[in-house]
Amino acid sequence: MVQRVKRFLSASDFFGNKFIRVILISSLFLQIGVWMRNFAILLFVMEMTNNDTVAVSMLYVAEFAPILIFSVIGGTFADRWKPKKTMIYCDLLSALSLLAILAALLLGSWKAIFFTTLLSAVLSQFSQPSGMKLFKQHVPEEHIQTGMAMYQTLTSVFVVIGPVFGTFVYSAYGINVSLALVAVAFVLSAVTLTLLPPDKLGKIGDKRESFWFELRGGFTYVLQNPALRLLGIAFGLGGLAVGIIQPLGIFIVVDQLQLDKEYYQWFASTNVVATVAGGLLVVGISKLVPSQKILAIGNLFSAFSVIGIGFSTYLSLSLAMQFIRGFVLPFIQVGINSIVMKTTDEAYVGRVNGAFGPIFMGSMVLMTMVSGWLSTFLPLAFMYLCSGILFVVSTAVISLMFRLKLQINPIAESTSNNQQTSQSM
């Protein structure tokens, strides 16, 4: 009975936090806009190019290339700028860009559609670390992990309903109405964010160091913090593990299981449902299990499921392994974000998040580029085994964090204080 009362009071405290309520509502509008935009643009480009694979691939380049190029830059500026205003301006600029593209479409220049994908991807590299910085400012440490889990669950739900919703809007109303509705969703997100508490004011007389000095300071901060250093290594290994098998899923269906390629949709559907279920479980256990162990569980079960998929020759077993892999994905995402939030000084949140983006994306893209070539002379089972081994090694690195207390590292904190001192001199 006492435990139930404590859980009720804890939940009341969590949802009583105005920041939590506002950021989740803003994220709801943002997810609606993002999925409507992504599928409207994808279906429109396929329609205009007669399903040209090169045109579709350029969309993905426009979406993911900014992560490599602008992640560190956006993270550094997130630490320099006021985070609330940054997020609001990014949402409004995204809405304005959509209206500009809509005008271009009405004038007959349909290829301008690629620009909105690129610009939105760039703006997200400034907005996302600003959101993490606000989390650090306004959410008590005991609620950070639950907050991350709630946000991840919301994202997972839209992985399920987003494609259906986006496809329906485009099919029913076309590209013009779709883009207009996306702009409205981004504006509603920006309006919701105005309800957040005001940004903190800097101290009078503070002088900022140069952009490049602060960018280097972010990497130095990560290297000086044992937990972040280990997390960076594990993150890179995870990127390599994902990259090896990223383009090979369809070949598991066609070559390994000897089925028609249409069966691949069952793997995608299973993964999506499992991700939502895993996200709901993480919300429930986030206050009971340490972040390091949540991340380790996700990695270890990913290794088991990936190896199982690689060696399975039965559809039912392969789908079961795919379900496990999707189920533990939120464990990995919530674990990583929670560790970063608990071990990073507020002044460095943007830069630390910006530093981790290229580590994962760069290692994943690197292995994705070579995995297709490797699969021409290596068995699929061996490729998936290598991916699983990398997940196991990543788990071993994470286990080194078990003995560490997740807190701001004193060495790194002194670095932060030194930087603040140098700024005021």
Image (spheres, rainbow, N blue to C red):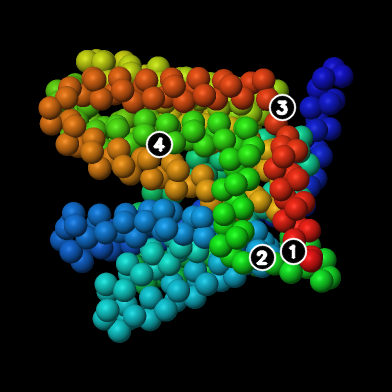
Q: Earlier along the polypeptide chain: callout 2 or callout 4?
A: 2
For the residues labelled 3 and 4, the Cα–Cα distance comes to: 25 Å
SS for tag 1? helix
Task: Determine the image quadrant of residue 269.
Answer: top left
Can residue 276 be seen in this snapshot? no
Q: Amino acid at mark 2?
A: Glu
Q: Amino acid at mark 3?
A: Lys
Query: Callout 2 environment at 10 Å: few (<14), some (14 to 19), or many (20+)?
Result: some
For the residues labelled 3 and 1, the Cα–Cα distance comes to: 30 Å
* Residue 168 x/y as whole percent: 37, 55
For the residues labelled 2 and 3, the Cα–Cα distance comes to: 31 Å
* Residue under label 1: 423
* Residue under label 4: 239
Q: Earlier along the polypeptide chain: callout 2 or callout 1?
A: 2
Tell me, for residue 209, which label it has, or none.
2
* Residue 53 x/y as whole percent: 18, 54
Query: Callout 4 environment at 10 Å: few (<14), some (14 to 19), or many (20+)?
Result: many
60 on left or right of 54: right
117 on left or right of 138: left
Q: Earlier along the polypeptide chain: callout 2 or callout 3?
A: 2
Disc 2 versus disc 4: nearer the observer: 2
Q: Residue at x 64, y 37 (%)?
A: 225
Disc 3 versus disc 1: nearer the observer: 1
For the residues labelled 2 and 1, the Cα–Cα distance comes to: 6 Å
* Residue under label 3: 405
Q: Amino acid at mark 4?
A: Gly
Task: Determine the image quadrant of residue 58.
Answer: bottom left
* Residue 14 x/y as whole percent: 77, 40
Q: Residue at x 84, y 32 (%)?
A: 9
